[in-house]
Image (tube, helix red, strand yellow):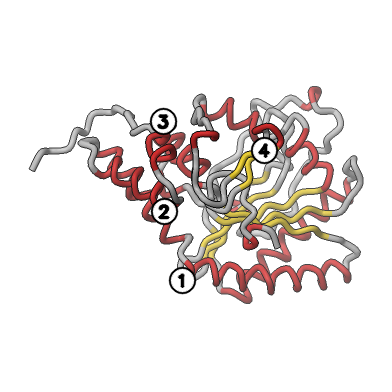
């Protein structure tokens, strides 16, 4: 048996080989996984293990559990929101396959542990506020966060993963005078280390939100994001747009010619500017992805 190459060389197989060769999403995954596993690099083999772990976390059993949590959680928060005069919009998402691979490769390049890729399933709560935040809106974000933690821990026996520490050395308030940065947070005592607080410590581009990852005893894992309408507009369409953030953060991207992908359920629309599919590559129209 040949000893694997353990030199620090992230020479990952070209994912386009799998995308252009496979005729179904399952074939694409199998081809890329095989290319990684047959490599002589221990990093590629570990990469393959990370994809297998992700596949397990997105198994039908875990997806069913997640769907059940979402249904009960949404109803609870709607009732709670009525009592506190807080209206909430819910967005549910499953991380797409290319996004997953981009993040795994980023973690390798940054020297971060691959098991910290935790945002495969996600629930985003958007508070129905105005186009500009108020102090009350900020306070309500923390109220929603605390109620969410209480509900998930109490009703689904969830554990919260320790979040990576946030720093704001690169954030300049003078560049983002329109956003509110509170003097202190209102997170439940004992849970501060579990929440990535981008409200009190925004990203350099002004992105604000509250993030945390919850895990059930059966290993069903998902991320919660909480933000106001103004924060969501900035994140989706303004200076905090995630695609620009990813370009700067990743330092690389998959240069995919989507016209070469020919699998059922996949299509390009609007001259190729938008991608809709049911195979988990980019924007999904799978009924499960939007509740």
Please, is residue 203 above or below residue 187 in the view? above
Residue 133, image quadrant: top right
The residue tagged 4 is: 274
Please, is residue 5 above or below residue 165 in the view? above
Image point 49% across, 31% down: which residue? 254
Q: What number is the disc on residue 218?
A: 1
Please, is residue 239 above or below residue 226 in the view? above
Q: Earlier in the sequence, mark 1 or mark 3?
A: 3
Image quadrant where one finds the N terminus: top left
Between the residue at mark 1 and the residue at mark 4, the CA separation in whole angstroms equals 36 Å
Decide which of 136, 217 is in the foreground and name it. Answer: 217
Tell me how many marks there are: 4
Q: Earlier in the sequence, mark 2 or mark 3?
A: 2
Q: Position of residue 231 (x, y in %)?
A: 79, 42
Between the residue at mark 3 and the residue at mark 4, the CA separation in whole angstroms equals 29 Å
Q: Position of residue 260 (x, y in %)?
A: 49, 34
Under tag 2, what secondary structure? Answer: helix
Image quadrant where one finds the C terminus: bottom right
Q: Position of residue 20 (x, y in %)?
A: 43, 37
The residue tagged 3 is: 109
- The 10 Å Cα crowd at callout 1, few under 14, some 14 to 19, many 20 or more, is few
The residue tagged 2 is: 26
Image point 53% across, 41% down: which residue? 99
Between the residue at mark 1 and the residue at mark 3, the CA separation in whole angstroms equals 31 Å
Image point 30% across, 39% down: which residue? 44
Q: Earlier in the sequence, mark 3 or mark 4?
A: 3
The nearer-to-camera label among 2 and 3 is 2
Decide which of 204, 43 is in the foreground and name it. Answer: 43
- The 10 Å Cα crowd at callout 3, few under 14, some 14 to 19, many 20 or more, is some
């Amino acid at each position: 048996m040949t000893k694997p190459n353990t030199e620090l060389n992230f020479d990952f197989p070209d994912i386009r080989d799998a995308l252009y060769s496979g005729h179904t999403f399952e074939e694409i995954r199998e081809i890329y996984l095989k290319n990684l596993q047959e490599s002589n690099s221990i990093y590629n083999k570990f990469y393959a293990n990370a994809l297998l772990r992700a596949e397990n976390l997105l198994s039908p059993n875990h997806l069913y559990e997640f769907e059940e949590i979402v249904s009960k959680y949404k109803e609870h928060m709607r009732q709670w929101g009525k009592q506190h005069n807080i209206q909430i919009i819910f967005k549910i998402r499953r991380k797409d396959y290319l996004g997953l691979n981009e993040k795994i490769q980023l973690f390798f390049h940054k020297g971060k542990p691959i098991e910290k890729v935790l945002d495969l399933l996600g629930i985003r709560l958007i508070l129905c506020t105005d186009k500009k935040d108020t102090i009350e809106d900020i306070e309500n974000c923390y109220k929603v966060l605390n109620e969410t933690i209480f509900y998930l821990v109490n009703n689904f026996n969830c554990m919260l993963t320790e979040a990576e520490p946030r720093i704001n050395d690169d954030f300049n308030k003078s560049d983002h005078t329109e956003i509110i940065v509170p003097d202190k947070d209102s997170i439940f005592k004992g849970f501060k280390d579990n929440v990535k607080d981008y409200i009190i410590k925004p990203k350099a581009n002004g992105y604000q939100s509250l993030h945390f990852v919850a895990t059930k005893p059966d290993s069903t894992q998902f991320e919660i994001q909480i933000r106001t309408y103004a924060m969501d507009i900035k994140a989706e369409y303004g200076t905090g747009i995630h695609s620009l953030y990813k370009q700067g953060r990743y330092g690389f991207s998959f240069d995919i010619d989507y016209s070469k992908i020919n699998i059922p359920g996949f299509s390009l629309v609007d001259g190729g500017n938008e991608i809709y599919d049911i195979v988990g590559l980019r924007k999904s129209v799978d009924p499960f992805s939007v509740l």
